Image (cartoon, helix red, strand yellow):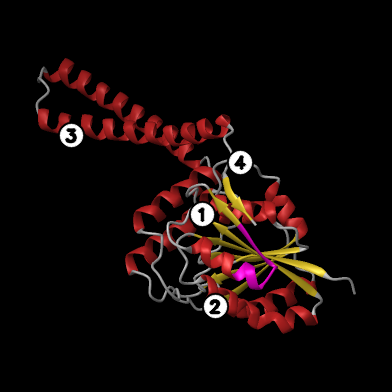
Amino acid sequence: MDKRLLSVIVPCFNEEANIAYFYDELMKNEQFFESKDLELELIYVDDGSKDQTVGEVKKLRDKDERVRLVSFSRNFGKEAAIYAGFVKAKGDYAVIMDADLQDPPSLLPEMFGYIEEGYDSVATRRVSRKGEPPIRSFFARRFYRLMNKISHADIVDGARDYRLMTRQVVDAILSLGEYNRFSKGIFGWVGFNTKWIEYENIERLKGETKWNFWGLFLYSLEGIVAFSTMPLALASILGVVFCFMAFILILFILIRSLFWHDPTPGWQSLTCIISLVSGVQLLCLGIVGQYLSKTYMEVKNRPKYLIKEEI
């Protein structure tokens, strides 16, 4: 059997404490890789780290030539790092994994088994959110439900970026060259035959998460804007509803003035109505602004990342 190549893509941002540990855990599967005639390339994509992440990767490179490094000139975000990993991956198969070991390498044999059964992609999802703040878990679940209702992308609750794919799937993802990327939506949008594996949430080995509530909220907005036009439709519906309400209110005031000659009292209620309508208008403008801003970034055609160093 000809040797096949597996590309392991590891986006990193300030993960110096986890680089070596991740490598050691991954290499526990080396006997499995050999049994399947799989060669390995390990691509660490450094997303502009401020610590010694690059230095730790270089140490691994000195003892294992299968280790590769792509280092950005600054922090471009995890989405750019994932895309860069796909661009640099040469493998017949590719898998995305976090360096903090929240994506257990021990699942790889099971995942590859499903690929051999004929699946194009094997994805993972967490069935619990142990160690995560309750309010963050609550909003995360609401986000997944909302996305599945308003978009055509199949986004599973608890889905991780940890996913093993065939070359065909990787090429399909690379064919989507958009600047504003939301990988979970892209994975669902391209389709293909996907097998889902469930596992309990694993807390990161060392260091602190780079995601806070505000960052995740902005990321969720990216996903909604990238894969659904429903907010635009909602803004239009709200506009029609409030125009209709205003028309009814005008008729009511005219009829009241003509037949009862009663000047319209209640400036407080009128102020509240004006404030409410103004708020809805600003909301709708904000929604339109989000889509315009994404269009603006797309037409600029800037590169998704800049490489400072590559090994």
The residue drawn where x is 26% and y is 22% is 250
Q: What element carries label 2?
A: strand
- Circle 3/circle 1 CB separation < 8 Å: no
Label 3 and label 1: CA atoms lie apart by 48 Å
Residue kind at label 4, given as amino acid type: Glu
- Tell me: 78 left or right of 51: right
The label nearer to you, 2 versus 3, is: 2
Amino acid type at circle 1 is Asp
Q: Name the residue under label 4.
A: 178
Comes first in the chain, label 2 or label 3: 2
Q: Residues within 10 Å of mark 2 (few under 14, many from 20)?
A: some
Magenta-drawn segment: 60-69
Q: Nearer the viewer, residue 288 or 263?
A: 288
Q: Distance between the residues labelled 2 and 4?
A: 31 Å
Q: Residue at 66% of width from left, 44% of height from top? A: 176
Mark 3 / mark 1, whichever is N-terminal: 1
Q: Residue 257: where, in percent of width, then height?
A: 16, 18
Residue highlighted by disc 2: 199
Residues 290 and 49: in front is 49
Say which of 21 and 285 sits in front: 21
Q: What element carries label 1?
A: loop
Q: Which amino acid does label 2 sit on?
A: Tyr
The Cα atoms of the two marked residues, 2 and 3, are separated by: 50 Å
| Above-or-below relation of 33 to 57 | below
As rendered, which of 27 and 254 lies closer to the eye? 27
Q: Decide which of tag 1 and tag 2 comes sooner along the chain.
A: 1
Q: Mark 1 points at which residue?
A: 47
**Residue at figure coordinates x 45%, y 73% from the top left:** 204
Label 1 neighbour load within 10 Å: few <14, some 14-19, many 20+: many
Dot in front, 1 or 4: 1
Residue bearing the label numbered 3:
272
